[in-house]
Image (cartoon, rainbow, N blue to C red):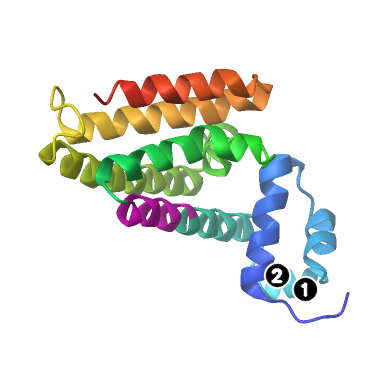
Amino acid sequence: MGRKLNKEEALSKAVALFWKHGYGATSMEMLTSALGVEKPSIYAAFGNKHSLFLSALLHYRTDLVARVRHALTSADSPRKGIERVVRFMMTTLYQKGVVSGCFATNSALELADHDTEVAKHVVIMLRELRDAFEYAIAQAQKQGQVTETAPARVIANFLIAAIEGVRITEKASPPKAELDALADFVLRALG
């Protein structure tokens, strides 16, 4: 185990471990085993378990928001970008066997009532996702690709609520066909 800690690699492994087990059920022994280093290396790099968790949450948030922004802006049209992200977040993650739920939402459900730092990270992530969606929706509305019956921000908040709702319910392993049908319904609601 005496190897040097690579922070990016360690954060990715910590995200996977915390995502699978939650904060409370993830022990330092599990972390040292998964990261392949001794406790002093983790403490030197991140401080304590809570600081490592917050760093992992930030790592997840940064990666997810960047991927969503890229998917929204690199599509052939704003509407296609929105569809790509909604399907990815509501169905594709589930079918690829990724640990169920959203890591940030799971963290909020477990900790946000009593951990303001976790709550802050989740609020920021949801705001960043909403802002990315809001911009794409406004562009799609200008091009007549999305309904104008509600402001772009309201529609963006609707998408976030639908996505996060699915990410919570997928923990109970609903049939994938139900998630696909729900994604179809959400996208039809955009006009």
Residue tagged 2 = 43
- Asked if 62 appears above or below 118 in the picture, the reply is below
Please tell me how crowded label 1 is: few (under 14), some (14-19), or many (20+) other residues with Cα within 10 Å: few
Callout 2: helix, strand or loop? Answer: helix
Is residue 119 at all visible to an observer of this figure?
yes
Residue 28 pos. (x, y %): 79, 56
Residue tagged 1 = 40
Which residue is located at x 80 percent, y 60 percent?
Answer: 34
Residue 23 pos. (x, y %): 67, 44
Residue 38 pos. (x, y %): 83, 71
Residue 13 pos. (x, y %): 70, 59
Which of the numbered marks, if any, corresponds to residue 93? Answer: none
Check disc 1 and give the amino acid type.
Pro
Which residue is located at x 72 percent, y 50 percent?
Answer: 17
Q: Is residue 76 found left or right of 85 in the rendered image?
A: left
- Asked if 165 appears above or below 127 in the picture, the reply is above
Q: For the N terminus, which image quadrant?
A: bottom right
Between the C-alphas of marks 1 and 2, the distance is 5 Å
Q: Residue 32 occupies which quadrant of the picture?
A: bottom right
Which residue is located at x 36 percent, y 54 percent?
Answer: 69
Q: For the C terminus, which image quadrant?
A: top left
Q: CB atoms at circles 1 and 2 under 8 Å apart? A: yes
Q: What secondary structure predominates along the stretch shown in magenta?
A: helix
Q: Is residue 78 found left or right of 173 in the rendered image?
A: left
Which residue is located at x 25 percent, y 30 percent?
Answer: 155
Please tell me how crowded label 2 is: few (under 14), some (14-19), or many (20+) other residues with Cα within 10 Å: few
